[in-house]
Amino acid sequence: MSLVNNVEFLRHLPKMNAFSGLGALASAVPTPLVETTEFGTNPGALRMFSFVPAQLARSPALVVVLHGCGQTAASYDLGAGWSTLAKHYGFALLMPEQQPINNGNTCFNWFNPEDIARGHGEAQSIRQMVGHIAGAHKIDPRRVFVTGLSAGGAMATVMLATYPDVFAAGAVIAGLPFGVAGNVREALHVMMHGSALSAPELGNLVRKASKHEHDWPKISVWHGSADRTVHPGNGDAIVKQWLDLHGLPLTAMSKADVDGHPREVWWNADGETLVESYSITDMAHGTPLGLAGNDERYGVEGAFLIEAGISSSYHIAEFFGLTDQVRQPRIAPTGVPRENADTVSMTIPVPPPESVPVAVSGRRTTRVRKSRSNGVNVGRVIARALTAAGLMKEQPKP
């Protein structure tokens, strides 16, 4: 990119530090986040904020949330509503915060080689925070997740790529693929135009980031179709990167609208969703807000926090498998044992060839076995279609 193009692009960027009053509101409203100053060597010089509700769910989960440029942990929490979700569903919340000394716009340095390598810089600082809070609150190591917006979304792909053994899944909002930029010039170019790399080339960038040889984390990708700050092609590139890692085809296995916005889904042979992608129609750069599936609203509108008729935070929590962990007492329906009262949900009956009870996080559910009579499991195909259409909750993997 020429200097002229760089300057022109920067001129059209939103004023990152003018946070439409949300930052001031966050400082005026008491935040539930608590700062921890001693959590490791902290080579990336980040600040650690967290929220742990009074009641954690069984096999407690941890969600790492990474703010965007010009934001703080508290302001993004207020805007996206993550601490409210954490309290409602009983999971721990970790919100690292960038410091101006590291980046003038308080962006996570997702393009700096010294900060995005395993065991180094900001990536290592976030990993140390995860280890600290996981040990202090007995977090289930199989239930650690990461999400973020913009530069925080790009940093979420960094964490998934460099520590795939730590994170079970991630969600990226208006972010970028891992490894597509190694300096500011390259970062600006890919922000403007997206990545021209093929799916195998994108996948190899992740494979080289660690020695991981097992299952890769699941991923949920969100991007506004009218984003002029981070080109929507970057969302497509993230999808391609993780489809290659999971060995999945580029063509979506299911397409449906969710709250009026297109969603594409890819799943494995067991019917478990591994990659999903939301294109938020006519939305600019930011986190989509709206009424959640439980008829509640999480978050507050502000710069880069946009009313779009869909609650990304809630849907991401659902993708992580956290929304079935409600701790509030409920009256068990007739015939349902009291110990299962908090996890009762409506299921659509599908005639299975054979069912067996499976213990999942202290709960019991029913998992359909693979049919041995032919190559098609009708029950799984129907359940998969209903799940992709949002009519049935995805069942946990045994």
Image (tube, rainbow, N blue to C red):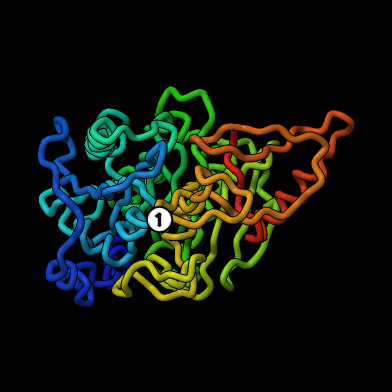
Q: Position of residue 331 (x, y in %)?
A: 50, 57
User: Between 393 and 234, which is closer to the camera in this rendering?
Assistant: 393
Q: Quadrant of residue 373?
A: top right
Label 1: which secondary element: loop
The foreground one among 330 and 320 is 330
User: Taking 18 as reference, is 80 left or right?
Assistant: right
Left or right? Give the position of 206 relative to 44.
right
Identified by mark 1, the residue type is Gln
Q: Does residue 362 appear in the picture of this structure? A: yes
Residue 291 percent coordinates (x, y)? 46, 72
Residue at the far right in the pictured view? 373
Give the residue displayed 32% in from the left and 60% down from the top.
Answer: 84
Residue 220 at least partly seen: no
Per the image, the residue denoted by label 1 is 328
- Residue 301 point in image, percent of width and height: 32, 75
Task: Name the quarter where the C terminus is drawn.
Answer: top right
Which residue: 36% across, 39% down? 159
Above or below, 125 against 11 in this view is above
At horizontal 46% and vertical 37% (from top left) the residue drawn is 168
Q: Residue at x 40, y 62 (%)?
A: 230
Q: Exactly how many numbered labels are in the figure?
A: 1
Front position in the image: 257 or 111: 257
Residue at the outermost front position: 334
Q: Is residue 290 above or below residue 128?
A: below
The residue lying toward the viewer, choosing from 360 and 104, is 360
What is the quadrant of the N terminus in the image? Answer: bottom left
Other residues around mark 1 within 10 Å, as few (<14) / some (14–19) / many (≥20):
few
